[in-house]
Amino acid sequence: MKSTPEESTILAEKIAVVDAKLEKLEQEIHEIGQPAGQELLRRLEMLKIEEKALKRNFEESRLRGEPDSVRMEKIEALLHHIEREESSMERDADFLHSAAPSSMGLAVEAGARVVDLYRRAFRRVMGDHRPLGSSVFVNHTHDNLASEFGLKEHDDGRPPGGADQ
C-alpha cells in the first residue's frame, strides 16, 4: 500500500514545526542556565539526534519515489515520540523558569544591595556632589561645620572633643 503525496506534505510540515519547537526550546533552556538546565540540555541533544534521523529517513523515503506505508508509519511513530519528548521538556523548562532563583543569583543580588548601601552611605557622609579637589572639612569654619554636621559647643565655650583641663 502506498501513501499519498498529501500525507507526505503534511508530514513535512509537521517535521518543520518540530524543528521550530526545538529551536525555541533550546533558547529557553539557555535562558535557564547552568546547572539547572544541564539535564534538559542533555535531553535536547538526544532529541536533536533523533530529529536528524527523522529528517534523514523522511528524505530517503521521498527520494525513493512514492514512499511505502510501512516506512511512513515508522517515520510517524518517530515524529510522535519526538513531539511527546518535546512537550515533556517544555513542561520541565517552564517548571525551572518558575522555580526559585539559584544561590548564585541571590548572591549577586545581595552583593549589588551591599554596594548600593555603601554608595548611599558614602554620599551621605561626603555629600552628593563636591567640586573636584574640594573636601567636606577643608575651607569651612567651625560654625559652618557645627551647623551642617550637628557639632555643639560645651557650656564653657570649648569645642567638643577638646582636651579637658
Image (cartoon, rainbow, N blue to C red):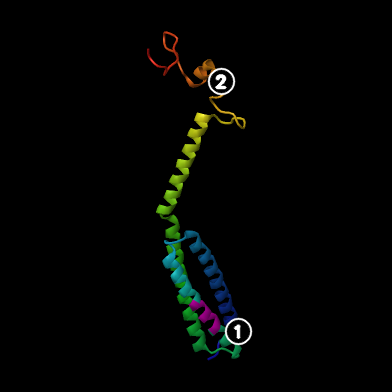
| Image spot of residue 108 (x, y percent) | 45, 49
Q: Image height check: is 2 above or below 94?
A: below
Is 21 a magenta residue? no
- Quadrant for residue 12, please give it: bottom right
Over which residues does the magenta segment extend? 49-56
- In depth, the one of 38 and 81 nearer the eye is 38
Provide the residue designation for mark 2: 140
Left/right placement of residue 146 relative to residue 134 reads: left
Q: Residue at x 50, y 87 (%)?
A: 71
| Image spot of residue 44 (x, y percent) | 47, 70
Q: Image height check: is 33 above or below 44?
A: above
Predominant secondary structure in magenta?
helix
| Image spot of residue 32 (x, y percent) | 47, 59
**N-terminal label among 1 and 2:** 1
Residue 143 can be seen, yes or no: yes
Q: Spot the residue most to the right.
A: 131
Is 54 a magenta residue? yes
Q: Spot the residue most to the front.
A: 165
Q: Quadrant of the C terminus?
A: top left
What SS does tag 2 mark?
A: loop
